[in-house]
Amino acid sequence: METVPIRPQCQTIYKNDRIFPCNDNERRFDKHLENQCANLREEMAKLQATSLKEHAVLSRKLDAITKEKKDIAKLLTTVQKENRAAKQQLEELMQEKAALVKRLENATKEFKFNTKTKKIALQKLDEATANCENLNKQLEQVSRDKEILEGKLKLLEKEYEKLQERVIMSSKTNLDNYQEHTPERDNTMKNISPHTGHLEVCQDMNLASVSQTEMDMKNIQVKIKQLEKNLENFNTTNPLGYQNGEAESEISLSAQGNATDTARTEEETDVSEFFGGGPRFRYWGGRAGDMISALALRMNEKVGILSNIRETRSDHGDLSTSSSPDIRPLDRIVSSSAAFQNFLRSLHNENRSNYTVVYDTF
């Protein structure tokens, strides 16, 4: 803004209503004052202009500062939000850390407990392996005893079949001789059944031979019962699936072998092929039990026949003198074979040892 200089005006000073004219000095002084006033006005105008410029600059700076302040306030709010979120995350991490520490403690406890249980389990495993080895040894021993008993049973069956054949043949010959040497008998004797004729012929035998045969039969029966007791301790079923009819048919087929040594060896090989090379632990409940029960029934029948012979012998004592001298006594029917007597002795000893072994193992 431009300032207009104000021109000074000369004024007269009236004193007592009188006008006095101005001096030159006064006029100079007034001019000097007017010049100073003009300079002061110019300086004031300059200062005013500069102040306005500075005010505009300061207002601009103030606006920029206010904008920066708003931006900083926004940043502060975002930073505070982030700080709160970071605090929450930090708290969650601390909680997770505490949970992990607890889990680590539990895991260490479980690991210690598992190590203890592992040691106990290893000890039990060692004991189980030792027991398994002992049981395997006992099983091998029992299988060997089983094979021995099978062989003994087979031989006993063969001897029994031979004994039965001898008894049948001797009864037939004695019956024929008895009928030939007793013509004074009544014709009604011809209609007598073979069983009663067999009893009457056997009544003519010596009492000593009958008692000896009965004792042999009873000894065989006792040994078979002991063998049954030893075999029943296995208490198992037949794994091969043989039925009772098949077992009886095999018994009858194996009983029809020859009496020679070659036939005996062939039957033993057949038995070994049937039973197999390995131990058949679950065999005795089926076939062997049926075989032994069949033999026991036959022995009981024979013992009953011999007891009937003794009873009829006591009733008809006079018939023993009328028998022919050609009739052969049966005092050595059972004990005629030395091998059979040795077999009975070994079977008796073997039954004792096997009886103790079976009860020790099971």
Image (tube, rainbow, N blue to C red):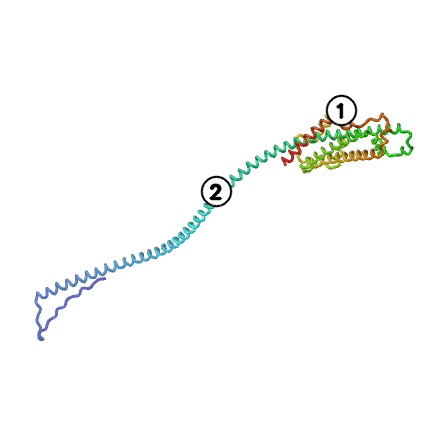
Q: CA distance from mark 1 to mark 2?
A: 74 Å
User: Which residue reaches farthest bottom?
Assistant: 17
Residue 278 appears in the rendering: no
Q: Amino acid at mark 2?
A: Lys
Position of residue 33 relative to residue 129, above or below, is: below
State if disc 2 and disc 1 touch (CB < 8 Å): no
Residue 143: x percent and y percent? 65, 32
Q: Name the element at disc 2.
A: helix
Which residue is at the front of the view, 44 or 308?
308
Look at mark 1 in the image and give the residue it sits on.
Answer: 260
Q: 324 left or right of 17?
A: right
Quarter containing the C terminus: top right
The structure residue drawn at horizontal position 81% and vertical position 27%, both measured from the top left corner, is: 329
Label ID, residue 355: none
Label ID, residue 112: 2
Mark found first going from the N terminus, 1 or 2: 2
Quarter containing the N terminus: bottom left
* Quadrant in which residue 225 is drawn: top right
Front tag of 1 and 2: 1
Residue 225 appears in the rendering: yes
Position of residue 112 relative to residue 213, above or below, is: below
Residue 67: x percent and y percent? 33, 57
Q: Amino acid at mark 1?
A: Thr
Position of residue 18 relative to residue 192, above or below, is: below
Which residue is at the front of the view, 195 or 145?
195
Position of residue 180 relative to residue 100, above or below, is: above
The structure residue drawn at horizontal position 84% and vertical position 28%, both measured from the top left corner, is: 174
